[in-house]
Image (cartoon, rainbow, N blue to C red):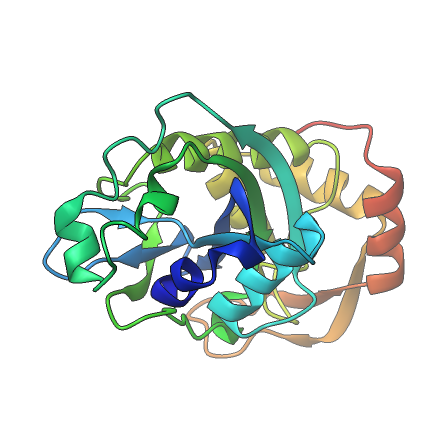
Amino acid sequence: MLKDIIENNQNYQPGLSIDCVIFGFHDNQLKVLLNKIPDSLQCSLPGGFIPIDQDIDTAAVTVLNTRTGVEGVFLRQFATFGKIKRNDQHFGKAILERLNIDEEKGKWLTQRFVTIGYYALVDFLKIIPNPVNKYEVAEWIDHKEVPELILDHKEILDKALDTLRIELNLMPVGYNLLPEKFTIPELQKLYETILDKKLDRRNFLRKITNIGILTKLDEKKSNVAHKAPNLYSFDKEKYDEVLKNGLNQGW
């Protein structure tokens, strides 16, 4: 795919790219989707270039859909990264040879690129990670165990996580990260994992209930060792309303 882009680079906006931080929640871990390069210790965030006939947000949605196979997920632009030498020396001769890209044509990649950061919240169980070429492996990694990343992708990931933590006080989170039915302890664990701190159980229940986005179901969680907790779902209409108007409380 990258070779095709280089061959037809006149169809893409020069010097501008997109990088997506895709978050999922599974086994009480906040996970991030990374591209792993075989025979390399480094990983990268999913990203892409911007066709000249596409809006930037549309191009970001295309990147996300290609990588996850899922449409209609939460996607938000959060920052732009444009240090002068952020991509210097990354696409060296060895990488171009491995990708079978002519060195002269590969110069398009060595120009200064400014990248626009987006973060996405997806349902882990609905995602089948999809590498875009044979040189990559798409893999979920616990956000606390992320290996070395290329370029400034660690800075992009850290900024995305900081932004998510701040916005957790401004909007509801969970609809895109949890299964359709969940328990209050599971929802609280999601918040604790993102915030990286413990929350008081009764205080959390009071606050999340007051937001008015939960529907208590006439079901209990099965296959648990102790007293089965109630299951809940999100009221999508009220969730979207709060997402639009924002919250006025913190965690």
For the C terminus, give its image quadrant: top right
- The residue depicted at 59 percent of the width and 72 percent of the height is 70
- The residue depicted at 82 percent of the width and 63 percent of the height is 236
**Residue 186 visible to the viewer:** no
- The residue depicted at 40 percent of the width and 72 percent of the height is 130
Relative side of 197 to 52, left or right: left
Looking at the picture, how far across and down is residue 35, in whole percent?
32, 57
For the N terminus, give its image quadrant: bottom left
**Residue 77 visible to the viewer:** yes
Relative side of 148 to 199, left or right: left
Question: Quick one: which residue is furthest to the top in this view?
Answer: 84
- Answer above or below: position of 215 versus 191: below
- Name the foreground residue: 202 vs 97: 97
Looking at the picture, how far across and down is residue 91, in whole percent?
25, 44
Q: Quadrant of residue 180?
A: bottom right
Q: Quadrant of residue 201?
A: top right
Relative side of 40 to 233, left or right: left
Looking at the picture, how far across and down is residue 39, in whole percent?
9, 58
- Answer above or below: position of 202 versus 22: above
- The residue depicted at 56 percent of the width and 38 percent of the height is 116
- Name the foreground residue: 99 vs 86: 99
Looking at the picture, how far across and down is residue 85, in whole percent?
35, 24
Q: How many marks?
A: 0
- Name the foreground residue: 129 vs 18: 18
